[in-house]
Image (cartoon, helix red, strand yellow):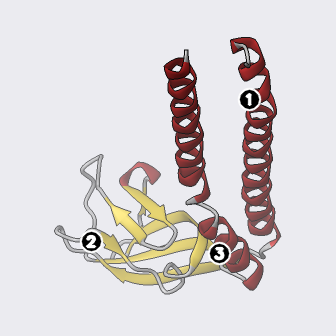
Amino acid sequence: MRTKKSQVEALFPLIVSLIGVGIVLVVGFLIFAEAKTQVVELIPSNSVENEAITFSTNTSYIALSNSANAVELTCSQLINGSGGEIIGAGNYTCLAGSGILITNESGVGIDADLFVNYTHKQASRAYNATSDVQNATQDIPGWLSIIVITVIGALLIGLVQYFRRK
């Protein structure tokens, strides 16, 4: 007959294995994330000056010619079309994949016709590959918890059977 201590000792290799798998997965995910960051840093940055856009008061994001596939988008200036005044940076936001959002926080006069200067980085094959790998491995952590719950359930069933025999 096995004692409680020997049962717990028998579970030790299983627990260590689960912890080891968890550590390997965490390190792997960190490596994937860092690889994606490194790839973005290697993509050359391109500048666009005086791209014409049209603003209306009910506009959300205005698509820029290079914003759709951009992994990085930084607007440097927004210029009123009629007078050439520079609109302050607090009045607009740029977002890769979306374009420019004009919020007019300071209440300045913003024309319907505007010009924007920005830099962008377009997705490369390397970026797409690292994104695909990262997306493909995103559901693994969800399975890890299911595996742990299954093992704990099996342990509880084993303990119930052990105490039934007594």
Crowd rating for badge 1 (residues with CA inside 10 Å; few <14, some 14–19, many 20+): few
To which residue does mark 2 refer?
Answer: 111
First reached walking from the N terminus: tag 1 or tag 3: 1
Q: Secondary structure at mark 3?
A: helix
At x 58% / y 23%, what residue is drawn?
Answer: 162
Coordinates of residue 83 in the picture (x, y in percent): 36, 72
Q: Give the percent coordinates (x, y) of residue 58.
A: 17, 69
Q: Are marks 3 and 2 in contact (CB under 8 Å)?
A: no
Q: Which mark is residue 11?
A: 1
CA–CA distance in space, label 1 to label 3: 37 Å
Nearer mark to the viewer, of 1 and 3: 1
| Earlier sequence position, callout 3 versus callout 2 | 2
State whether residue 31 is above or below residue 79.
above
In which image quadrant can residue 140 be found? bottom right
Give coordinates of residue 60: x percent, y percent.
Answer: 27, 68
Tell me where residue 16 sits by quadrant.
top right
Q: Position of residue 27 (x, y in %)?
A: 79, 47
Image quarter for residue 87? bottom left
